[in-house]
Image: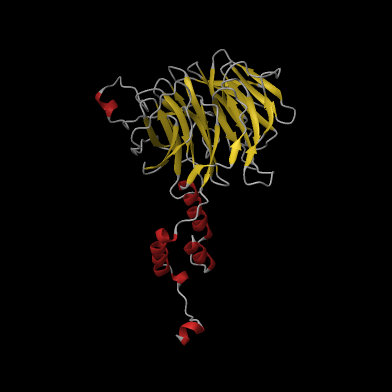
Amino acid sequence: MLGFLSARQAGLDDPLRLRRAESTRRVLSLEINKDKYVERIHESGVNTLDIEHIENRYMLSGGSDGVIVLYDLQNLSGNSCYTCKAVCTVGRSHPDVHKFSVETVQWYPHDTGMFTSSSFDKTLKIWDTNTLQPADVFNFEETVYSHHMSPIATRHCLIAVGTKSPKVQLCDLKSGSCSHILQGHKQEVLAVSWSPRYEYILASASADSRVKLWDVRRASACLLTLDQHNGEKSKASSEAVNTAHNGRVNGLCFTNDGLHLLTTGTDDRMRLWNSSSGKNTLVNYGKVCNESRKGLKFTVSCGCSPEFAFVPYNSTIAIYTIYSGELMTILRGHFSSVDCCVFQPYLQELYSSGRDGNILAWVPSLREPEPDDTSEELSQQHQQNPAYKDAWSSSDDDDG
């Protein structure tokens, strides 16, 4: 770190390089925060988390008990050991609480005054944060597994919804109705995700082993059906169907630049796809244990080099390098299966939740390295980096 600081001061390195190096170091040193607790409100498992990107301060959680909680992550106590308190709660006594498990919560991307939630009670609710009352409710005929709003859209206000029906449904916030339906899957849609690069591009994952990319402006809509074999197997049989996994596909996550798409399936595999060509990049992550029967919510880092994926792995969280597939470390702290994790890029913090009902905060280690461990490394940096070279001598040295 001293080498990066000196090089930056001397004008030898771009400031972005220092920021990326420090962000990477912080991610690789993540550990459970023993001084920061998230108040436990949920009586059962916590299925979903979301941190707003306006202030990176407020977090939503949705539980199997149907309860939604809004937390303030900022330390206002002035103490090093503190608890992130619940600001407000849509509890069991609330007249508009979800009747069954809340599967997805999401902040409105451009304003903390609104958030959304979807549930096994077949509803998608749009909430006014200030009054904690639903501004609108979308009702469906089937169980809702997932929903997502585009983080960048300026020309549409569509919410993509995946349900037990094989159809992806698009709800328009402006009109308050379902605008149209995307057909092509054969079984329930377990996960949906808008591209962070193109506001009309949507990805959907289904129990039929398929992942589809859609352009919602087109009449036919479906652009690609991802094929794990990149077309080689389908040549042998004209009836072969393109599949992304050999089991249910229950997780989707675009990289932050939108150029690649990560998918997870119950075949215990994670795959990385080129989102433009639809090609499987064939990165090998090894076995990624996945026994979830519903959507699995994982996330990626931002501003690191290389970038990382944070993936629930039974009762742990595995951290992989996205483009090489290397397993960097495993975070242990939950007592039961982990269902969700979200990354806070402002401080390189990670929050995870699972069926044990706990929400854990993972923060970069603040421990100083032992001098014996770093002396050789520092000496090498001094030799290699011109920023460490000096052309002066002290009077003490001259006298000696």
Q: Position of residue 120 (x, y in %)?
A: 56, 17
Residue placed farthest to the top in the image? 141
Residue 83 rendering spot, x and y as whole percentages: 63, 38
Nearest the viewer among 66 and 261 is 66
| Residue 80 image point, x, y percent | 62, 47
Residue 114 vs 54, above or below: the answer is above
Residue 77 visible in rendering: yes
Query: Could you tell me residue 71's position as x and y percent?
Result: 65, 34
**Is residue 233 shown above or below 29?**
above
* Residue at x-position 64% and y-position 22%: 125
Q: How is the image coloured?
A: secondary structure
- Confirm whether residue 203 shows in the render: no
* Residue 374, quarter of picture: bottom left
- Number of numbered discs overlaid on the protein picture: 0
The quadrant of the picture occupied by the C terminus is: bottom left
Between 381 and 395, the residue placed more toward the observer is 395
Q: Quadrant of residue 328?
A: top left
Q: In the displayed structure, does residue 51 sit left or right of residue 228? A: right
Seen as rendered, the residue at the extreme right is 131
Report the residue at 49% width, 53% height from top. Answer: 20
Most distant residue in the left direction: 236
Residue at point 57% right, 19% down?
101
Q: Going by the image, does 37 lie left or right of 237?
A: right
Residue 360 in which image quadrant: top right
